[in-house]
Image: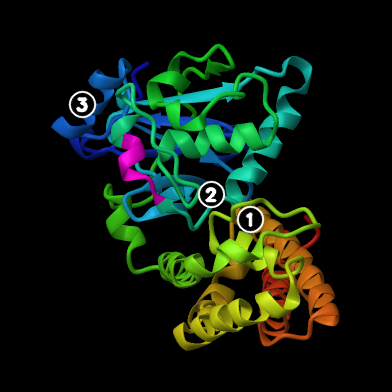
Amino acid sequence: MTHEPAPGSDPADQSWIFDQDKVLPGDVVLERAEGKQSDAIARLSGGEFSHALIRVDGTDFIEAIGGGSRTIAVARVVIKDPSRWRLLRYVGARKYSRLVANQAALEARGLTFRGYNLKGALASITPVRIKDPSALFCSELVAEAFQRAQAPGFEGDTSKVTPASLEKSKAFVSIEPLPLIPAPFDLPADRSAAYAPTGMNRENQICQAAYAAVAADLAVLEPSRGPVRWPPGDIHEVINLMAFCDPALGRPVADKIHAIFEASGYYHLLDPVKAEVLSHAPTASLQVVQGWRNSFGRAAQNAETSAGYAAQRPWPLWQALAALHTRNATFFATLVARSPYPDL
């Protein structure tokens, strides 16, 4: 389909973004970026695309790129040539497909902050497979999210899944035409460059550094009880492990994580932008407010969980996390209350 440029614009300069209301949680976006490298990846994998993202709740996608798995706002995904993009919707669970897709979106959110599985990405277009529990490449992240959601069609080795695999999978249907709207203002096409100075990128860097610092300490911590994934692949799964492992062994690891978080400013990453974000609350769009409400829900749940763990194990890590999530929940509740949609 041909997407018409906005009235009065130069077609060569026109760009689009996805209409957030029409891209659902669990939808998968395939991309072939400009350049010979992306074209070569698509060709060698037997498909038309070289990259994959998955839509999650709020206003975000999750994707795995060279810096690791990250959250990226839908509005930051700028499209210059719609023919190099495709939107896929999961239908592999028949009448339960929407529920499964929603669960996959939730699981994808939990895969943020992992490293990038470069070796796995390179091997995915060869007979060799390289699996790393602490790192993912783009289509592997999508497949892992659906596998964790117990989605039919994703029972195998997720490191074998390429963008071409997703493109050709009968578990998805292609949504056409692409639900695009003209970019409301001049947005940078290089979303990685735009992402680099953000607080989300800083959070990603801190979490990956904390995981690397304690990775060697994890072998003795395998839990005997509790809903903990083993081995933990990112710092948040390590933190969950702290609630169920042997306290004598876990306390030094928890203290190391807390020291890194405290020294890096992790517990106060939102503070520098709170005043500016609050100033925009009265004019926020419906989609943005929905994102704030979702963030409030996650923060409130995390605060309750952390406080519960702190009551059982009054370690500085749990106490600081409970305080952090409580502050964040209050902040997002304030944003919603000051927005045009306080009763959403």
Q: Amino acid at mark 2?
A: Asp
Dominant secondary structure (helix, strand or loop) of the stretch shown in magenta: helix
Q: Does any portion of residue 79 appear in the rendered image? A: no
- Taking depth in this image into account, of 45 and 295 the one nearest to the observer is 45
**Outermost left residue:** 36
- Residue drawn at x 39%, y 30% is 129
Residue at mark 1 to residue at mark 2: CA–CA distance = 8 Å
Q: Is residue 119 magenta?
A: yes
* Above or below, 48 relative to 291: above
Residue that numbered label 2 is attached to: 60
Marks 1 and 3: which is nearer the front? 3
Residue that numbered label 1 is attached to: 291
Give the tally of numbered discs. 3
What element does badge 2 sit on?
Answer: strand
In percent of width and height, residue 337 lies at 74, 70
Residue at mark 1 to residue at mark 3: CA–CA distance = 34 Å
